[in-house]
Image: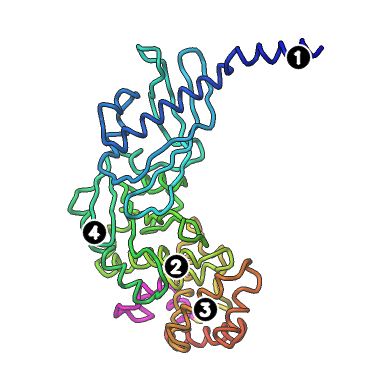
Amino acid sequence: MVALCLLLVALVACGGPPAADSARAEVQSLLDRRARAVLDRDPVAYARTGDRTGYDRLSAVPLADWSYRVTAVRRSGDTATAQADLSYRVRGHDRAPVTTARTLRLSRGADDRWIVDSDRPARKAGQQLWDQGTVRVARGERSLVLGVGRPSDQLRDYAELADRAVPAVSDAWDRPWPRRVVVLVPESLQGMAGLLNSPASSYRGIAAVTTGETGTGRRAPADRVIVNPDAFGLLGDSGRRVVLTHETTHVATRAHTTAATPLWLSEGFADWVGYRSGARTPAEAAPELAYAVGRGDLPTALPADEDFGFSGDADRLARAYESGWLACRLIADRWGEDRLGEFYRAVGAHDRREGAVESAMKSVLGTTPEAFTAQWRDYLRAELG
């Protein structure tokens, strides 16, 4: 029996890896070569690995890292489908890799080696900007703008706005942050939705959003400000400045924004920074809430997270943002701007939502949620009535 076992072990050892494992190793080697060609900016080497459409589309993007990790291979004769995690870093901005799932279709080439026929987002993954077309780049002093289907001068305008937003945010938020921002400008609302892997209807009328990992430390990748060019293009100069400053505030405060932070605070603070250096009155900046207060419909409570849903009532969404902004403006007016920032960080320092605002109001502002809500309602009457 012992001899038989030894014989079986020897046969397995001599037989080599199973066919599936061999294909996976071959595909990993192929993708390693493909990644090296991207980093070396070598279109000839890239073309040897298969379809070069992706290379042409992303060649302008300043990359510090680019790699694939094959997670599965399904082979059928001379074709195969591979699942892989793509990790990359944008030079000068990403401190940790952005990782996204990809599906690659492969076939056997003339030399009997695998080549890539297509490289697309996995079923539940969002698109990358180069999936939508050739990426153009505009570099600002404090920003990097990547766009598809947009002229270079328009991308430079975004870079100028972002460059102005960064010091405006730093003036209001005195904690360490990268003080740089990456802006993605797709060709349309549909392009924005593709990057976010969500229906376009969810973002209609939304000028921009910021993606990123909340409550993370220095190893988190850079946030991306994703613009909806359809809505952004309807804004005037002041509105565009407010939007880019608002989104840049999310980048700056990301490490202190956690599951404990209610949306009225995170969105209200970002709006407060956005409007901080402007001359718009509360009634001008909060027209929906001013209209409601004017007709006697004074809100009874600060907005809940669900009030900020993009796919709901547009007027309700506007009132939620305006309510959060005026709550933060109240804190800055009555307790001071430094105390507002301290309150924001105190809320985010809690490990859960329950009790976070109550505790921070007590320790930082010396008040209670009930008393603050009453003060906020009085403030709305005074500013908007």
Residue occupied by mark 3: 343
Kindly identify the amino acid type of the residue bearing the numbered disc 2: Thr
Q: Secondary structure at mark 4?
A: loop
Between disc 3 and disc 2, whose residue precedes?
Answer: 2
What residue would you read off at disc 1?
5
Residue contact at pointers 3 and 4, CB within 8 angstroms: no
Residue 59 visible within the image: yes
Residue tagged 4? 140
Percent from the top left, x then y, of residue 376? 52, 84
Amino acid type, callout 3: Phe
Q: Mark 3 or 1, which is nearer the eye? A: 1
Q: How many marks?
A: 4
Q: Amino acid at mark 1?
A: Cys
Q: What residue is pinned by disc 2? A: 253
* Pick the front one: 11 or 114: 11
352 with respect to 146 (left or right): right
